[in-house]
Image (cartoon, grey):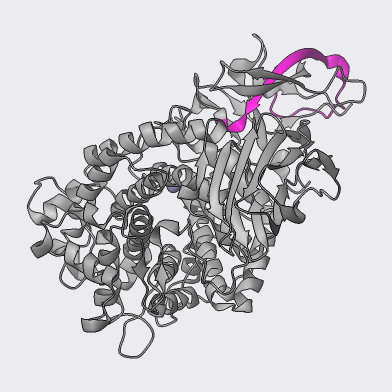
Amino acid sequence: MAKGASWSRREFVGTAISTAAAGALPIHSLLGAPTGALADGSTANWKDEGVLFVDKSPYAKLRNVPVHAVTITEGFWGARREINVNSSIPSMEKLLEANGRMDNFLRLVGKSDAPQKGPVYSDSDVYKWTEAVGFALQSGDRPELRALTEKIIKEVVAVQEPSGYLNTYYVGDKAKMRMEPDVQRWGHEMYNLGHMMQGAIAYYRATGDTTLLDACRRFVDGYLLPNFGPGADKKPIFSGHPEMEMGLIELYRTTGEKKYLDFAGYFLQGDDRIKFPKRAYVYHFCGIPFTSRTHLEGHAVRAMYACCGATDYYMETGDTTYLKTLNTLWEDLVTSQMYVTGGVGARSDGEAFGDSYELPNFTAYGESCAAIGNMMWNWRMLTATGEAKYADVIERALYNGINSGMSLDGTLYCYRNPLGFDPSGGDHIRNPWYDTTCCPPNLERTFASLPGYFYSTSKDGVYVHLYDNSVLDWHLEDGTGLKITQKTKYPWDGGVEIGVSPAKATDFTFYVRIPGWSNGTQVTVNGKAVSGATAGQYLALTRKWAAGDVVGLRFGMAPQVLEANRRVVDDFGRVAVQRGPLVYCLEQVDQPAGTVLFDVALDLRPNAPGKFHEEMKSDLLGGIVVLKHVGAAYEKPSEGGALYKPYAAASAAQDRAVELTMIPYYAWANRASTQMQVWTPVIRA
Ligand SMILES: [Zn+2]
């Protein structure tokens, strides 16, 4: 940290507050402090920094809107977010305590006798939870939650060593192992610190409290930068689990100190002074130049977080070799590596990407964290480019492969998110706690931060990316106040009414996202039809907007039947059904008695008795639209039949009609444990 007269006020207060001598200074004295001075002499309003603070990022096309500027009211995400903040976040804190995550800190200052608990990355659970709280508080103060988090932050910071090192695992006998090459590979020291930064920044943007943020800076400034990095006098670093990269770049954006950006660039470049077997560079997705990569491989969360960091780096530096690599990897993702749910990571073995088109359903890994990483990466690509194809991936992942990760009551979590399931093997798909509990607080921080993903601004106007009942109270980049109100029953209904009210009549462009799945979208402005809506693009509505203007949207919500590329062998001969942004599935529990889920097929023949019948069921699974379909059940059950037999062309005469009921995938496994599948065979007779 800088010394003497060059200290900014925020640095001074932050340092003062984090020293024992100033312990009596109440932290809430910082609340309300309007600005923070950056090292470059400019100021930033910490309250108005979004999920990402890219207002000064030269290669970001869009700016983020702060979380507090968007209020999500009653509706699909409103209900989910209420459960998140009232149930998930508080219950997770109790679980963190009960499972020794805070004892790990307290033990080091003599306040607990409990032994160390949890894996090497256990500190990150606390930081990710802190980040969830930080985002939740950006939507409105919750004094009890804030007080609890202040206490936890104090307990964390209390164990920071004079060198700046802060980690509860590599202490005592293990202290000598710190930053050894194998510990860098598996020990998650940098991963923990990356999450500490993200938690610290989200909390700072909510409260102005820099206690945890200053601790991050002491770790980097005091322990890492003097001893590690490029240069013969410093030791090399292998990132191990990418995460630190995006943490450092957000720290750069928050403080204006370029050394953090440069350090992130060093991580992304890799340091060949550390030699590991080739498989390490595949699995860990770091250690070699990011720009040398051509394929998503290895541990899926690591790969997604590396892509996030690399996109952040591009937005700051404009290095086109990064953009080229990111485009190559993104094409790899969407053409051969992503599930229809937006989930990624096909293999349980190594929680890894598979080969191209290797997308099994029952054994799909699809870790909740990996789907979140996918959303975070696409948010960065969208921010960099303004291209709607990234928003399509965000929506797909958010509504499906991420949303499935938390139970409807907000207390049970999926680690895996398979697309087919048979509970007879004894697998419990939703659990309150995992010893590796990366996913639950990751889901919580995502839902808490969601308002920050609805809109962006650009030099020429404002973009809307996501639809739900909400109010934006913000301004155009020229400072003109702007209120945007959405009224909708999305995702159940395709109609959205958007009130656009600038503080004074102003020329600007309102970019309206037309989802890639929407056929026949209708758009009106003040009741008059507007042409040009194209699925998978933003429709640019350029005019002089004035208070009271209304944009009407009607998206095509007819259920769509999707087939996979033939090379996805697990989906061959099968289809998935999507309605609006929601992917649907069949659960055994909804099907007529005597119908075995794995012995049914959809009947999509031209003379079939009607494809899908929609029914709003407000009392089922929190209120959902179910899809009914008269399909077919094979007369001969598959169970107990011969494993192999002579081929016989399918005949409709062998089938009986059966009414099948489909529910949105995200809502599966919220009732009795039951079979489930997303991809269902079709009668091809
Ligand atoms: Zn996880």
Q: In the picture, which quadrant includes the N terminus?
A: bottom left
- Confirm whether residue 672 shows in the render: yes
Q: Looking at this rendering, what residue extends furthest in the right direction?
A: 607
Q: Is residue 584 above or below residue 290?
A: above
Residue 268 in picture, x, y percent from top left: 48, 73
What's drawn in magenta, residue-wise? 637-666
Residue 25 in picture, x, y percent from top left: 14, 57
Q: Looking at this rendering, what residue extends furthest in the bottom direction?
A: 232
Q: Residue at x 59, y 65 (%)?
A: 478
Q: Residue at x 75, y 13 (%)?
A: 658
Depth order, front residue of 569/459: 459
Q: Is residue 459 above or below residue 145?
A: below
Would you say 170 lies left or right of 55 here?
left
Q: Residue at x 75, y 30 (%)?
A: 681
Q: Looking at this rendering, what residue extends furthest in the front direction?
A: 504
Q: In the picture, which quadrant includes the C terminus?
A: top right
Residue 62 in picture, x, y percent from top left: 61, 63
Q: Residue at x 78, y 35 (%)?
A: 556
**How many numbered dots are placed on residues in this image?**
0
Residue 661 in picture, x, y percent from top left: 68, 19
Depth order, front residue of 423/77: 77
Say if the magenta span includes residue 648. Answer: yes
Looking at the rendering, which quadrant does residue 17 occupy?
Answer: bottom left
Q: Is residue 341 above or below residue 233?
A: above
Depth order, front residue of 185/447: 447
- Confirm whether residue 358 shows in the render: no
Looking at the rendering, which quadrant does residue 201 occupy?
Answer: bottom left
Say if the magenta span includes residue 417. Answer: no
